[in-house]
Image (cartoon, rainbow, N blue to C red):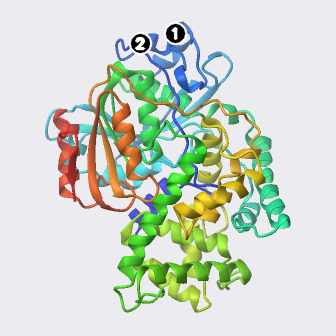
Amino acid sequence: MDSRRLLRISATALAAGGLVLSGCAGGSGAATSSGSSSAVTSSAGASGGPGGAIPAAKLEKFYAQKVAWRGCGVANFQCGTVRAPLDYTKPDAGEVKLAVSRVRATGPGKRIGSLLVNPGGPGGSAVGYLQGYAGIGYPAQVRARYDVVGVDPRGVARSEPVECLTGSRMDAYTQVDQTPDTPAEQKALAAAFKEFAAACQKRSGKVLPHVSTVETARDMDIVRAVLGDEKLNYVGASYGTFLGATYAELFPARVGRLVLDGAMDPSLSAGDLNRDQTAGFETAVRAFAADCVKKTDCPLGTESVPAALDELGRFFRETDAKLVPTGENRQLGESLATTGVIAAMYDEAAWPQLREALTRAMGGEGSSLLALADSYYEREPDGTYANLMSANAAVNCLDLPPAFAGPADVVKAVPSFEKASSVFGRNLAWAALNCTYWSTPATGRPHRVTAEGAAPIVVVGTTRDPATPYKWARSLAGQLSSGVLLTYEGDGHTAYGRGSDCIDTAINTYLLDGTPPKDGKRCS
């Protein structure tokens, strides 16, 4: 798998314990000049998120700060640190330091301003995404006229990262059976989620209550002002669409050119998000199976799509009963095997590798499928993990109340999840139990985001997106008062920069001259 695809899988994948994408929270605000903080006196609004009346005077020092830019050790990129309040309701009660990186506009053409990027997660490193892809791989004409900027959100990567389990305990955690067949197995899964939550509280208790999407959106407004921009220009993917929509709700008059690619629906509960996403992965795996059965090397057979999916389900059940050797001290069980398949659903370019990995695993050698799972979890060869999984849970569990109150609720919900996906339903239903045992109560609530008064916001949806189902893009575009829906008819997660000239031209035109595509435009 090439490095760019690995980055995309890991940066937008939703980490262990549940493919729960967090909801937005926000409020309203009125823009002033680029350096003013008066707008941040707004309340948290319908979400119930952290916020309330925020004294502008106490935030002025954050808005007025200067960044000491330095080299990053990566050619052409600069790095720095931006300070933000740990708790916006108590701006004097401590700070968080946010890692920021940029690559300056190259020209030709007049510089438009800064373009912030976020790859999603939550938990994906925007700095890593910038330096590994966006800052060198975005269209040349966009990079010519924007300083492209990545800011690791609070709790993520280089920005006061949330830390939970050690590498060895993470290995154990990712292998826990997520399709429990007995009360004892249910108890073991619940115990794993409890251990994870307790470790996060023990190692990151100070920052844990303050990594909500609302707070990160407020941080983005500080970064906008520090960079000298009157309005925010932004491209957010996957969870990054929640972040962008939250910013628009908090600061509608400060919205510049916003692209929300692989959109999420902030009006949905955690349970509905999980169920919808389960159906999204079913759509993707059916597309994979339809492609696979046409190949002579398809490990799932060449008879039909239903037969191929039955064979995949049989393989998962076999790995539940008997582990597959991998040539190292870890073995491949059902949980890791399922994760490996899910990882390849994010990009159809990974399907040939998945066919090979399944062929080898079904033949008794699981290292290739394990490697796909490791890329999803951002596990390094030395057994260490990036903090994607930890930050993912921390943000999700703060942004929305848990999907389930306990194992009994999951048991009742399993049939509806299996209806959504015969392949992944049971696994993803149990995975959604993770926030049940979280130590910090949720501060956000599902709600519709309208962002009245915002400039046009381009919402992008892919018809067979596994992680952010297309109907979410339709919903978000309909909620936003200035939402414009752009559709990619195809496979994979997100659309910009993935090979569609139609999509790329529409977005580039919007970013460069401010003209959004016609609402409802479709591309293939």
Q: In the image, is residue 403 above or below residue 137?
A: above
Which mark identifies residue 56? 1
The percent position of residue 398, horizontal first and vertical second, equals 64, 36
**Percent x, y of residue 379:** 61, 64
Residue 472 point in image, percent of width and height: 41, 45
Question: Disc 2 residue type?
Answer: Ser
> Percent x, y for residue 210?
64, 31
* Residue at the image point whose x is 58% and y is 44% from the top: 156
Name the residue nearer the viewer: 125 or 172: 172
Q: Is residue 403 above or below residue 455?
A: below
Asked if the residues shown at circle 1 and circle 2 are in contact, with their CB atoms under 8 angstroms apart, the answer is yes
Q: Which residue is mark 2?
A: 36
The image quadrant that residue 1 belongs to is bottom left
Q: Is residue 321 at least partly visible in the picture?
A: yes
Q: Secondary structure at mark 2?
A: loop
Give how far apart the Cα atoms at labels 1 and 2 are: 9 Å
> Where 494 sits versus 52, above or below?
below
